[in-house]
Amino acid sequence: MARRLLLILTLFAGATLCAVAAAIPAGKVRVDICEEGLPADNSWPTAALVTESYDEDLFGLFELPQKYVGTGVRGDRPFPTLVRASAEVTLPPGKHRLLLRARGAARLFVGGKVVLTTPFDQPRQFAVGNAGELPVEEQDNFLDLGPGYRFAPPGNREVWGEVEFNGPTTIVLETLVGGMELKSKKPFRPELGETVVAVALNGTTEWKLLSPGARQVRYTDVDWSAYESERRCRLAAMNTAARVARREAAKPYWDRRRESARAWLAATPATPVPALAAGFPAHNAIDHFIAQRITQVQAETAPLPKGAVDFHREIKPILEANCFSCHQGAKVKGGLRLDDRAAAFKGGKADGPAVIAGQAAKSPLHQRIVSTDPEEVMPAKGERLKPAEIALLRRWIEEGAVWPEFAVSHFKLTGLSDDLTFLRRVSLDTVGVTPTEPEIAAFLADRSPDRRARVIDQLLADPRWADQWMGYWLDVLAENPNLINPTLNNTGPFRWWLHESLVDNKPLDLFVTELVRLEGSERFGGPAGFGVATQNDVPMAAKGIILSSAFLGVEMKCARCHDAPTHAWKQKELFEFSALLQTRPIKLPATSSVVMDNLRLGGREPMIEVTLAPGASVAPAWPFATFCDEATATALAEKPDHTRDRLAALITAPQNERFAQVMANRIWQRFMGRGLVENVGDWEKSVTSHPDLLRWLGRELVRSGYDTKVIARLVLNSHAYQRATDATLAATSPLFIAPAPRRMAAEQLVDSLFAATGKPFSVEAVNLDVDSVRTIDNALDLGRARRAWMLASTSNERDRPSLMLPRIQAVAEVLEVFGWRGARPDASNGVREVSANILQPALLSNGTMMLWLTRLSDDHDLTRVALEDRGLDALVDRLFLRLLTRHPTAAEKSFYRDALTPGYTTRVVAGAKATEKPPARRKFVGWSNHMKSEANSLRLEEEAAARQGDTPTARLEPEWRRRFEDVLWALLNAPEWTHIG
Amino acid sequence: MNRRQFLARSAALAAAASLPPTLRGAETTRFVHHPKGKADHCIFIWLGGGMAQIDTFDPKRRGNAKTKPSVAGSDYAPVDTAVPGVRFTEHLAQTARLAERVTAVRTVNHKLGIEHALATNFVHTGRPVSGSTIYPSLGSVIAHERGAVGDNIPAYLLIGYPNVSRGPGFLGAKNGYIYLVDTESGPAGFTPPGDIDATRAASRQQLLAPLQGRAAAESAVGDYEVAQREALRLAGPDFMRHFKLTEEPGSLRQRYGGEFGQRCLLARRLVQGGVRFIEVSHNLNFINGAGWDTHNAGQLNQHVLIRELDTALSALIIDLETKGLLDKTLIAIGTEFGRPGQFDGGGGRGHQSSTFSLVLAGGGLHHRGAFGQTDDFSGKPVESPVTVPDFHATIYAALGINPTKELLNASRPVPITDGGKPIAALFG
């Protein structure tokens, strides 16, 4: 495919076609992509230049290989692009029916002559469709070419005719992809739809994709669907190869970067791995660091007298709720920190030491909270402390203000988790779903002593690894595409670049560099889409906030409109950083500045300051000299005079140790449930629990060439990761004595429910413009989701039934109550709220999605399992393994066996078959007709159907089937489902 | 954590009600006098698409959509209301008779432009979209400030489609809504599927019991298990009975009219059940295709929509009053913007945010039929302009919430409205 053919095609001269035909490989369809020499006015080109070619088996196209630019990021092809598929085809002599179908204008040459054409886009169609007013009745006119005929999907045009064949014939299909809407001069999405030539031989009614070789595929719903999935895998492999090729071209520069990282490592002191403390288990160096810290802290901690106030349990929550907003971290009000023992005892500017152990009345902390002077009393804003809280603080000070560094009640490690618990945990942490029956069997069958390490290696190599990280990065980088009319601080769908980066396991420095360069496609998945923030007065400031928090652990949200009151960073510094992204100075708009006079209406002095005047121009500059010297960029950047390249180099330089440590900490937090720096996106507000381990991990990340999986492998193999959970812990022990059970992420939960039950994840295309009447600026097609992260908000701010996607909504509502966000207008640090609320179990017990999962339809994999005859004991065992990754207890086994016993032996209905759906042509609802009454009614029918769920199988006797469904419901609602043990 | 503690923590969602209203956060009462109403509930009716004020609550001289060129003005005749000098259009005749209980605020305006999603977000949250935070909706703020009225009932119900504009934003999931898309389907997550009758629901719970028993008390899984019991209880008859419209007399159901009216009736039942805030969407778009977004041919059947609103709104006002609930229940009608007096090429109307009507009724306010004055074609305010934050402040004040209060977004104080001031004339 990488072949670049420079061949001018004169497209209406039959003679040229023959010349081209000579180059077609025998038995194959050659697909030529022409990006040059194309007219912009929706007409056929007179001379187009082939820029890329590849081979196909059949005349059946639905997607082109991806175009990549830069170091392998998604780019756009020109609008339009000509696609030409040519082959030498031999059909039996005679007159055969041919079908030409395509999304864009298409024409079919047989033996050099045009025999079929479909039209160019019709301006009226798009004007009416854009207003949403295409009559639904127009869909009554459609082509039906006999039994089994696959009806055209929305937005495709088709035409058929009879053609006489006699011996080998050259067939050429041409189509223009992504034409221009002539009135607005904006392009359409570059979609092929189903660009197909099919044939029904003389005397037959069966349609097949036209084939030049041995491969034969019937053009029916079922066979097309299988063909499409098979070809998608091939396209993915071609795309991967294309990215590899782009990266190969950039290799000299990145080799130099690796070289300089090695030099830096050699020139800077290493962090030695401590000797293993006596009595501690260790799988690798990580456990040495962990053991060392535990023994250190243990030595410094005196046991708390019985009945004494427990700082972490009783005092810290009061400080957190009332004081931390101003008195936590490096920059604090009055110079007083209350998040650190030493600092609190040292005190602030006004009062001196805040706490005087044993003397509450003399302690300013106490004086301030009881003060009646409105200028003195704390908290300065908000409600006063409650009398009980004040009393508790007083008693704590009187008792000596005992303030242990860590909230741990004991120092006894838990043992290794059992094998199945480990397997469930590590599978969810790496591939985002619970292990399958075969995966469980293979692991249990492996008796080698290093089987945990082996399964970790397998899982790290699994492509689903990318899926598991998607939700995380979509959150952290605030990907926020809108299916229609982007307005709500929307970005482009750069999810596709993210996913490919994870599939490729791109080194993190390259990953960040690609993101910061903002190259490639804005609307179709390149990092340029990250650079967009619709209806935002300074998009690059929004992006600066995201980048600094994601990769440097620097929180600058507040600096968007004023100097941060409790962060070190001033507004000017954020705008300097953002100007690097902007590549030129940014003028501060008045809308990005707080009007201080409004805050001075009364009371105390405002808590914030504005030191950058609206209208001021801020030039690009690196504000983080504390992390690394700006001059580093000159030596390291690929294009040192380009500000985005400089920024990328400064963030990712090995000299900037902060970057490697922030990334190592993020990886650590994902697997361990707690960061070494707890607030992964805002390091100013956290104390580092294990500074040596953090530095060591950062250097290991640099040494690995910024390879996430190297750090992941270290963490997953550690004893600390593999220890059994302590169920009484709300959060993982700060000393990593034991992990706490972690609530599954929303995507893990939903993906696992579908994977474990084997119910197909079948929802609408994530697209409201299904027949493509809208131009690229105001409608996206995010395709068919196969995993939860691929969904997006259905964006129905318009509140129109016709714009509802009921099946997506049924899944999205579950995702959302578990913390997923369909719309991400603001960035998150990647750590979601995990507390329980009643909507979570509500939707898992009575929601529409769970109805699908607990209804034994013919396409449900547990229907197949239930039909197998292996006995009830085996059935109960399998259910527990598949769903909960554990064996049932003896009591559970007999309980559920008893529940399933009545009717078990007669459960199979003799002679009943799985229902087959005949091809049905259903009218569609899209943007193009959504303002029509009929479209609204149609959608309500779809919604009712979604709520109804699939028909239960006829192969199981109904009463027993319901029994089995109820057991399934109970297992899926087991509270343990929602947590990683 | 035991059950009591758990319920305390997940307060506003389920059992908020059993606790005193939570008023934590910064209370800035130092310098502003603000009116304080006595309403306990709010029914927020949403007319998605942009209600044409000139064809409803702010009639002007007659225009004509059908002539070429068309003549700007109201598409319908005006009628007098019970308040002297205040007129609505003819399709609001029933509401007109109740105008002493109603105020059409005719001078609401914003500069957020005329894109539906953006304006919808603004009218729900009172703030432009920000890249650094997500602001809570009116319903979530009220749920957060006042919790549910009744015991063991959610504070915020939505009859319509979920979207981020209706969500809790930085106030967090516990201040979100429970939703249903229509009166037939019941609330998502609490309505057992059709094939699960009470017997089967009970046998499912028996099958679940041993697995629930494994969840350790005082643990994260245990918290979930407590929430699960609560959810299953809500899916039972005590909570679900509020959704049984069949319990209402047939004559009353008839007075409320079609599906939209039934939603309003359901809202009244939920008020009686102790729900604090109910958003009711009037998105019966099959009536004219466009719903309230009456471009082009959407205008043709607009009067059917208006009459449906009129029937339901007037029935709701009378019903609440009959049951002694009107002074305790503020009805507010929201829409993202209005429409110009001029017609578009297809005989419908485009979008206009320079002035539009939002309506208040009941809630113990001093109603006056209409508030504010617009120009000849209802194109802009000429007297007493009202911002969207002012409208929100009025709703908060009516519900006894200090409209100058500050909420806390993590540590950052966020004024409850963006400088909004209640419409003083509506408070005694």
Image (tube, rainbow, N blue to C red):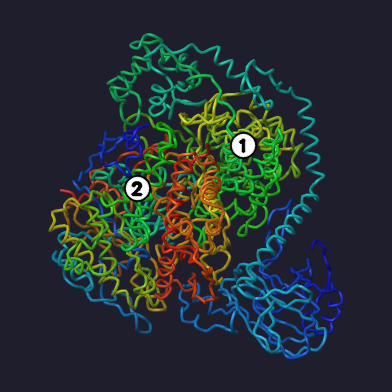
Q: Quadrant of residue B6?
A: top left
Against B127, is A400 above or below? above
Number of labels in the image equals 2
Left or right, residue A548 beside residue A255: left
- Residue A570 can be seen in this image: yes
Q: Tell me the number on the disc at residue A667.
A: 1
Compare residues A105 and A644 and report the one nearer the observer: A105
Residue placed under numbered mark 2 in the picture = B232
Name the image quarter holding the N terminus of chain B. top left
**Circle 1 sits in a helix, a strand or a loop, which is it?**
helix
Horizontal side, residue B323 vs residue A888: left or right: left
Dot 2 falls on which chain?
Answer: B
Distance between the Cα atoms at labels 2 and 1? 37 Å
Q: Chain of mark 1?
A: A
Looking at the rendered image, the disc whose residue lies closer to the viewer, 2 or 1, is: 2
Classed neighbour count for the residue bearing mark 1: other residues with Cα under 10 Å, few (<14), some (14–19), many (≥20):
some
Q: Nearer the viewer, residue A53 or B306?
A: A53
Look at 31% across and 80% down and name the residue there: B64
